[in-house]
Image: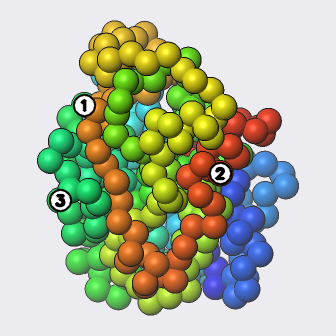
């Protein structure tokens, strides 16, 4: 099987691509990214922008596409323009990638989505399965774009019935290549008082799920998450830190005030997760993908805070 990977120079590709290279049956890997990947990352690099023409040619002779390219956030001055740029890459770029894959004759497209598509809401059930409605929290551009990208994936599947499509929905992806934002949040000197349990998943377990989705004749969405969820007490034990607690409303206000100046602490919209629950049911992934996380949630946190290199987000 010949596999193409968008966002091939991004942070998650550093965990996914070596797993692909080690998997039996995968004969070639094509890394699609405007930026060259690290020299030690296996695969053939093609310098392409997923929003530009020519993507179909870059996918020629491939059997499957793993779509990782996604810009997480851009805060600071010029934010309205940055939001348009994010939408262009995250939504129009995803549409272009899925359509190009279908026109190039690929059999499979796997899109890395996010648990954020469900939103953190006070009326969420104890666990959300894949049938739960997609209702991202207002103002959380990352979640809104993930929902829109899933809609583009569904449209591609409807227009091209021979194309097998899969969407994986992980919570925060931790591990040696975790995004700088996640590292900052884990090491933050403050946390909200109380707050719901949180979920995460290790990058290696995400790679395992991607390989299973490639190998098995499955369709649709799959939740991924490590267990058990991180209560504030478990998180303190995993990090070895006891941060100061502040009211969630105050932290949200501080973050909202900082957002026009810097994106270092993420978007205001995601802070709803500090106040409301969003826990995933992963039975479908266990049943149909044969997937089970090898890393507990606490182990994910410790692996992220170890002295490992810190990489940028997807370069698209």
**Residue, x 26% and y 39% (percent of image)?**
276
Q: What secondary structure is found at the residue carrying circle 1? A: loop
**Residue, x 35% and y 30% (percent of image)?**
194
**Residue, x 38% and y 34% (percent of image)?**
85
- Residue assigned mark 1: 139
Tell me if I can see residue 140 in this picture: no
Disc nearer the start of the sequence (2/3): 3
Which of label 2 and label 3 is nearer to you?
Answer: 2
Disc nearer the start of the sequence (3/1): 3
- Residue assigned mark 2: 299
Splitting the image into 4 quarters, where does residue 59 fall? bottom right
Which of label 1 and label 2 is nearer to you?
Answer: 2
- Residue assigned mark 3: 133
Q: Residue at the far left: name it.
A: 123
- x and y percentages locating residue 311 in the rendered image: 68, 38
Q: What secondary structure is found at the residue carrying circle 3? A: loop
Q: What secondary structure is found at the residue carrying circle 2? A: helix
């Amino acid at each position: 099987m010949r596999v193409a990977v968008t966002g091939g120079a991004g942070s998650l590709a550093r965990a996914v691509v070596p797993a692909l290279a080690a998997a039996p049956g995968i004969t070639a890997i094509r890394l699609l990214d405007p930026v060259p990947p690290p020299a030690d990352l296996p695969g053939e690099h093609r310098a392409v922008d997923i929003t530009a023409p020519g993507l179909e040619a870059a996918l020629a002779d491939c059997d499957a596409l793993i779509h990782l390219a996604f810009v997480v956030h851009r805060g600071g001055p010029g934010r309205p323009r940055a939001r348009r740029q994010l939408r262009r890459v995250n939504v129009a770029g995803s549409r272009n990638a899925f359509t190009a894959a279908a026109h190039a004759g690929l059999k499979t497209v796997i899109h890395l989505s996010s648990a954020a598509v469900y939103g953190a809401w006070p009326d969420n059930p104890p666990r959300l399965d894949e049938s739960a409605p997609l209702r991202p929290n207002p103002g959380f551009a990352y979640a809104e774009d993930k929902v829109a990208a899933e809609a583009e994936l569904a449209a591609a599947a409807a227009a091209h019935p021979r194309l097998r499509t899969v969407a994986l929905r992980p919570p925060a992806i931790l591990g040696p290549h975790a995004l700088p934002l996640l590292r900052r949040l884990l090491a933050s000197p403050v946390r909200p008082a109380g707050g719901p349990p949180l979920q995460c998943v290790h990058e290696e377990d995400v790679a395992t799920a991607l390989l299973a989705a490639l190998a098995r004749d499955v369709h649709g969405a799959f939740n991924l998450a490590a267990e058990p969820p991180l209560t504030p007490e478990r998180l303190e034990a995993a990090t070895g830190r006891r941060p100061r607690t502040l009211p969630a409303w105050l932290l949200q206000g501080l973050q909202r005030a900082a957002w026009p100046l810097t994106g270092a602490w993420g978007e205001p919209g995601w802070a709803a997760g500090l106040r409301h629950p969003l826990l995933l049911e992963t039975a479908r992934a266990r049943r149909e993908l044969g997937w089970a996380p090898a890393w507990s949630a606490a182990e994910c946190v410790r692996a992220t805070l170890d002295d490992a290199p810190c990489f940028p987000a997807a370069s698209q």
